[in-house]
Amino acid sequence: MAIRSSLKSVVELLADSWKLYKKHMNMLALIGVIPFIFEGAKMLLTPGFAIEYGFPMWITVILLVAVAVFAILSLVFNLVMPLALASAVDEGLRNKKLDPARLYKTAFSNLIQYLFVVMLLVIVCVGGSVLLCIPGIIVSVYINFALFTFLFEDKHGIDALVMSAWYVRDLWWSVFGRKLALLFVSFVAMYVFIVISACILIPLGFSLTVFGIIFELFVFMIIIPFMMTYLYVLYKDVKSVKGSKGPDKAFTEETEKIFIVLLVVATAALLMFFFIATLSPRGISVSGQSFGGASYAVNVTNSNTYYHNSTNGMMYYRHSRVFTNY
């Protein structure tokens, strides 16, 4: 692979990404739409209308079970979809015939190891965010290519994150700017789609549910596949600039230490959050309540309510709508 001195411009990356995406857009859309099928089924089978129109209880129960099943399938396929899409883009670049069933099958075979990488990604980002917003953004850019290093370079666990950080090293601002450009283009595309769809669907009397389903279909079939294509093209471009030389021992050890510290920070923050939530007071105090011309201070603790009469100094206790003079 030839080594270049700088990354392609945003315009070049967008042009290359669009060319690759357009060539395989049908198969990429098909891969992207599979999770949407389960998501859409979950939305359509919501039991709210059954309750509203007084359907028999057994129909509501069946709908609830179906919604739960489709919600699980939607979650699983949404987790696996990035692997299938990334593999599809890679094979498309090498002019291989794309087979969505085979790509998803391969993606599921890597699911456990991939989930471990995703877990590390999330925790490391949380750890960076705990140290304020900017460290979280910095870390998220450094680990931007962890999916690709896991999938195409056989890097597992924290090694996938370290390899991604190596690629981004000395190119952080370039990668950040190009990723920001992708987010901007995607936002503009979604905004334009929303405006055009609203102008067409609302006058025709379609509900917000239908509008939401059509918008999600657009995101799953076009936005997500194109974003994956762009990120893959950016990853290949960064690799061509960095060359085939991998991270040295010093960089690997230093980066692993940083990631471990962020993992510890994130874990400690989550434990502290749950600890504080557990110890938080359950009582709610409200002043200024007035009953029969007297002013009361109200304290609600669990399911019991206490009223303090500021006029006569008496305390009243209410439980199950019965007032008792204390």
Image (tube, rainbow, N blue to C red):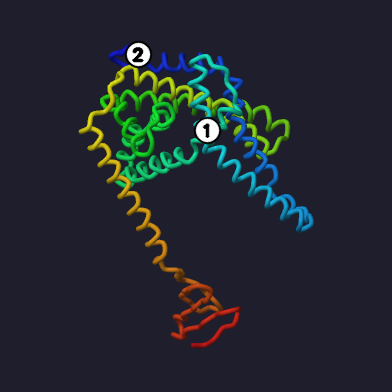
The image position of residue 241, as x and y in percent, is 31, 17
The image position of residue 71, as x and y in percent, is 61, 45
Amino acid identity at mark 2: Met
Residue 107 bears which disc, if any? 1
Label 2, on which residue? 1
The image position of residue 325, as x and y in percent, is 52, 88
Q: Which residue occupies 68% across, 52% down?
A: 64
Q: Is residue 92 visible?
A: yes
Q: Is mark 2 on a helix, strand or loop?
A: loop
Q: What element carries label 1?
A: helix
In the foreground, 199 or 288: 199
Q: Which residue occupies 31% across, 35% down?
A: 138
Classify the position of the N terminus by image quarter: top left
Above or below, 252 relative to 61? above
Q: Which residue occupies 23% across, 29% down?
A: 248
Instruction: Quote the CA–CA distance across marks 1 and 2.
Output: 27 Å
Left/right of residue 131 with respect to residue 87 in the rendered view: left
Amino acid identity at mark 1: Ala
Ranked by sequence position, the earlier of labels 1 and 2 is 2
The image position of residue 322, as x and y in percent, is 59, 82
Q: Residues within 10 Å of mark 2 (few under 14, many from 20)?
A: few
In the foreground, 249 or 165: 249
